[in-house]
Image (spheres, rainbow, N blue to C red):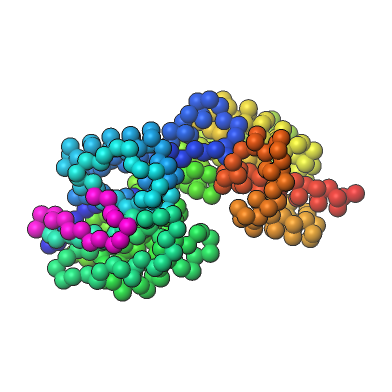
Amino acid sequence: MASIRFIHSADLHLGSPFSGMKGLGAGQWKKLQNSTLEAFERLISYTLETRPDFLLIVGDVYDGEDRNLRAQHRFQQGMERLQQAGIPVFLSHGNHDHLSGGAASFELPPNVHVFRDSVENMELPVGNTRVKIAGFSYGRRHVTEPMVEHYPDKQAGVIQIGMLHGSEESDTEHAVYAPFRKEQLLAKNYDYWALGHIHKRQHLSIDPPIVYPGNLQGRHRKESGPKGFYDIALTDGHAELEFIPVEAVRFERIMIDCSGVQHMNELFNIAKQQLEAHESEALVAELDLQCLSDSAIHMLQGIPSAELLNAFREALSEQDGFVHVSSVQFNTERLSAETSPFGKQLANRVASWDTDDWKQALQELYNHPRSGRFLPQLDDGLQEELRAEAEAKIRKMMALEDQR
């Protein structure tokens, strides 16, 4: 019986700067800055404890092409620990840490195979089982050709695994790199496709498995929920997958049931109680206030959004552990019903903006000779913060306008 066990991870993004986050305490900020490294340490510890046959890392080990020096050092140390335990590692670089970026400053141990910028098919004997692992690294940031065409077909008597950092060519939500169609992957008859690039955990196929594990650590509100990797056992063509969460800080949207609330102290107490029931070691939370009465909505509408957010942060600062409130939102459906048709249209337009739209809208501000140099980088985190503030402002103004 041919049987192997391995770990499938991707999108470590070590050294992610989290530059869009605001309002954190000093301890919380340090925890967040170290979160990608801490999640990586948990991956290494799990691998050493469970001793799989090998470890796959499918692209974007580092957050940027300059490859943060501290992140490189921590990664090299982790690989050395796996070398001492005799655990092979197969690594591909993705669009964020492509081979044309900053040169690696640390030499990796011999247990780590780094794929070249063309497809290779490496063989690894596991007991009496022949295993082949096909993959490639990005030679430059933008790989737009369908690299799957260069992957070899499966040979008889071999367990064949494919590593591919890319996205489906029909994907409209993400930048499409190394595009593929699911039918192309299935046609190769591989036993397992280990994907990377998309930070949301998902299965494109169950048999055979075509899997995105997501990233190890969420970095903003769109990367919410548990984050980690897969522990996979393959036995005679049958796959068993176990997801292992390792995030050090979890991003989560949390619905707060505000039924019966009339005063702010009641609202704070209910939020505390419901957050206490949320099992997370460290939490960055978007609070969505649900089931508000008319009087509670009227009360909240009279409070500036920044003041309301700061009040929630202070009220919840007494919670055990790390709890940071990133935003406070009213029930979307209820507010939408009270917003004018023009307000809804305007809010929906802002919600659909991408990076280019934000750059165009803020062009004069960022290009101003005096103010521009003091502004933060317009990254994903800042865009999400601006989007939430803009939508809240639009809904509030349109609702108030209708009441005059």
Image position of 292 (left or right of 171): right
Quadrant hosting residue 309: top right
Residue farthest left in this picture: 128
Q: How many marks?
A: 0
The reply to whether residue 117 is visible in this rendering is: yes
* Residue 217 image position (x, y, % from top left): 43, 43
* Residue 288 image position (x, y, % from top left): 63, 45
Residue drawn at the location 49% of the way across and 69% of the way down: 170
Residue drawn at the location 73% of the way across and 51% of the way down: 335
Which one is in front, 53 or 313?
A: 53
The reply to whether residue 79 is visible in this rendering is: no
Quadrant hosting residue 287: top right
* Residue 231 image position (x, y, % from top left): 29, 51
Task: Find the magenta span and give its range.
Answer: 113-128
Residue drawn at the location 25% of the way across and 41% of the way down: 108
321 in the magenta segment: no
Residue 326 vertical placement versus 144 (above, below) = above
Q: Work out which quarter of the rendered image holds the N terminus and state it.
A: bottom left
114 in the magenta segment: yes
